[in-house]
Amino acid sequence: MTFRWLPDAELDSHPRLTWFVSCVFDLALKAMYRIEPIYPPDYALQPGTLVVSNHQRDIDAPLIAPVLCQRQGLRFNWPLPFFASREDLFRDDFLAEYLHRWPRPLRRLLGRVPLNGFFRAMRVEPIRRVREFSLTEAFTELPPTADSSQWLNPRGRLERASASATDIDERNKPPERRAWGLRRLHAQAREQLAPGFRTTIDAQLQRFTDLLAAGRVVYVAPEGRNSRSGRFGRLRAGAWELVRRSNEPPPILPLALSYDALQRGRLHAIVHVGTPLHAYAAADRGAFDAMLEMQIRRLYPFNASHLISRFLVTGPAAFTTTDFGRWLEHARTRLGKAGLMLDPQLAAGSIDNLTTQRLAWLQRVGLISRGRQGWRNDWPPATAPSWRSPGAIVRYCDNALADYQQALAPGMTLQP
């Protein structure tokens, strides 16, 4: 019997479980985030499509899924993609380490939750990335030895000797679980691991190639990891390999997303879906990567957080409400005239309302304060980019604005 609520159910061994988990996850995401999709005319997700996007946060792929699938009631209009995801997600203890900032009892409890079944139902497939491969995983693939320290280089031995076995902070957790574990091995150990690495990655890439050939939709983030700075990262070989290995180049659907995070309430995510690419040059990886990067960049939606961040980073130390509102209007107009994509809420919203709401929020989180004749800019210039605090988000969004603007409109200046 055909399971009509999932478009490609006949190709799935457990369509009802996939449908159920996807529905629950979709409802949860829409309760926690405000997702703003932007579609091309006559949007359709064709079988065998390779979906690509920029990568800014760990939540990117889950947020993209409901945009691509367009659930209406109990039915998904389009198939759920297969997501290429970091291999360490499938470790038994991944959740406990990922939630290292949570209280220890809760972290231990959640660390016992088996994630493999959930990921498989959500069509998440592993892809090995060198960065996430830890020493613990490396030791399991090296010949067994009574003293694993013989595989370590001087840096690895020093870190193991100085680390506390009970400290699992991201920067101070035991070296066996840190990222870039291979950098802590000596050259001979890495040489022994190399053939197994190549075999594993080759098999994983072939799995995604076979899925595309079978008419399944596959999603990859060509950057390979989320951007830590806000800037678009160097493209990895994954997307090129899938195209190169395919007998017929698959249609490529580019999309881009950004986050309007400098406001109260649920995080606002804007997802801009492009049009499928059916004819593209794939004979040379350099040309292919350049084409793919520009296709994604052109779809990037600039939002109010980008403009606010630029004002705080490069603007005056003191300003009035009128100054701030005029700057937002000026910046919105300049971006629009340059042909850059704007978040629909920024493009059509009232600047007066935006000014009032955002200034109140910025004051509440301590990025601005009342001055003698208006406002003082209290953003700390030494802040590094991240998603961990409002000040860090300012740096992240300003980096993204500078990077994407320079690539898309190199001659344009945007200063308060």
Image (spheres, helix red, strand yellow):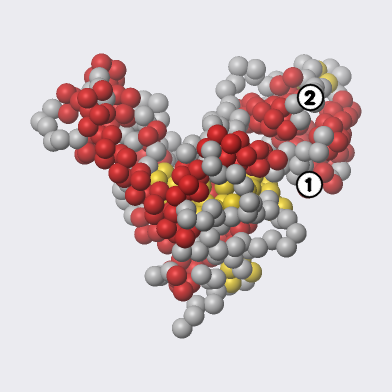
Res. 86 image quadrant: top left
Q: Nearer the viewer, mark 1 or mark 2?
A: 2
Q: Is residue 196 visible?
A: yes
Query: Which residue is pictured at 71% across the width and 21% down the height?
Result: 313
In this view of the protein, which residue sits in the foreground, 284 or 402?
A: 284
193 displayed left or right of 315? left
Q: Is residue 363 visible?
A: no
Amino acid type, callout 2: Gly
Secondary structure type for disc 2 = loop
Res. 141 image quadrant: top left
Amino acid type, callout 1: Gln
Q: Is residue 135 above or below residue 349?
A: above
Cα–Cα span, label 1 and label 2: 26 Å
Res. 332 image quadrant: top right
Query: Which residue is pictured at 77% across the width and 38% down the height?
Result: 340
Mark 1 or 2 closer to N-term?
Answer: 1
Q: Is residue 34 above or below residue 129?
A: below
Q: Residue furthest left?
A: 146
Secondary structure type for disc 1 = helix
Q: Is mark 1 in CB contact (under 8 Å) with mark 2?
A: no
In this view of the protein, which residue sits in the foreground, 61 or 254?
A: 254
Q: Residues within 10 Å of mark 1 (few under 14, many from 20)?
A: few
103 displayed left or right of 221? left
Q: Which residue is mark 2?
A: 411
Indicate the position of residue 364 as horizontal and vertical percent values: 70, 32
Q: Residues within 10 Å of mark 2 (few under 14, many from 20)?
A: few
Q: Residue furthest bottom?
A: 1
Q: Which residue is mark 1?
A: 345
Query: Which residue is pictured at 65% across the width and 31% down the height?
Result: 400
Indicate the position of residue 180 as horizontal and vertical percent values: 36, 29
